[in-house]
Image (spheres, rainbow, N blue to C red):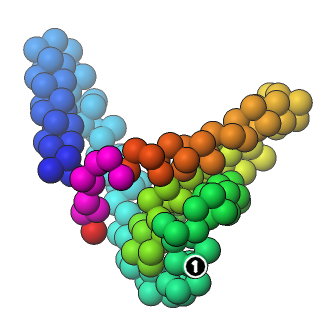
């Protein structure tokens, strides 16, 4: 149900904001549509490549091995392994989320998947190397990474307690 409601709410916000911008009558709607078309032109090819890639990746990943190491029964060890794996994924969302979808389809446990995505988003090694160290220095980057180290395993642990309490069903 949430999968259906979320895009509806997002589109309602888009329509409302477009209406508010239109009432200003200063050409911002046209400018906004031009910017949106530019983003669409940039993102559409990526999405068209990323989604089939996830489907192919799901077929290539050995499900029994992944289920053993990262399945729901892998517990803390799986959460820690998924956290480490998430730290090492050197890619943006167009790769990380299809990879997460592929992992989900081959049997990764929900707490492990949450730990993977949390580690990917917090640690993103490509972002640390490309932006944090050059702009903020190695001391700042090391301090931020050290202070964030517990976040991914903690998110997986919290998920182990929260998920059984919900009647959550995957939309895939």
Q: Secondary structure at mark 1?
A: helix
Residue at (45% x, 75% y) in the render: 107
The part of the chain drawn in magenta is 164-171
Q: Position of residue 124 (x, y in %)?
A: 66, 49
Q: Nearer the viewer, residue 132 or 35?
A: 132
Q: Nearer the viewer, residue 106 or 99?
A: 106
- On the picture, is 55 further left or further right than 172? right
Q: Position of residue 110 (x, y in %)?
A: 44, 59
Residue at (12% x, 33% y) in the render: 12
Which residue, as the protein is rendered here, is positioned at the far right?
A: 139
Q: Nearer the viewer, residue 125 or 28?
A: 125
Q: In the image, is residue 23 above or below residue 169?
A: above
Residue at (63% x, 48% y) in the render: 153
Task: Check residue 134 for magenta coloring.
Answer: no
- On the picture, is 123 further left or further right than 16? right
Task: Check residue 167 for magenta coloring.
Answer: yes
Q: Quadrant of residue 20?
A: top left
The residue under label 1 is: 68
- On the picture, is 94 further left or further right than 153? left
């Amino acid at each position: 149900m949430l999968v259906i409601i979320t895009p509806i709410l997002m589109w309602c916000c888009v329509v409302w904001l477009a209406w508010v911008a239109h009432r200003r009558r200063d050409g911002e709607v046209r400018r906004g549509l031009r910017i949106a078309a530019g983003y669409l032109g940039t993102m559409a090819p990526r999405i068209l490549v990323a989604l089939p890639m996830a489907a192919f990746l799901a077929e290539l990943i050995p499900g029994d091995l992944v289920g053993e190491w990262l399945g729901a029964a892998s517990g803390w060890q799986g959460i820690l392994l998924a956290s480490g794996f998430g730290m090492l994924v050197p890619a943006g969302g167009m790769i990380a989320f299809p990879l997460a979808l592929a992992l989900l389809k081959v049997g990764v446990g929900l707490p492990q998947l949450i730990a993977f995505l949390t580690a990917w988003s917090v640690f993103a090694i490509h972002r640390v190397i490309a932006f944090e160290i050059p702009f903020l220095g190695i001391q700042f980057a090391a301090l931020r990474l050290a202070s964030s180290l517990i976040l991914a395993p903690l998110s997986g642990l919290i998920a182990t307690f929260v998920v059984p309490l919900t009647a959550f069903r995957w939309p895939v």
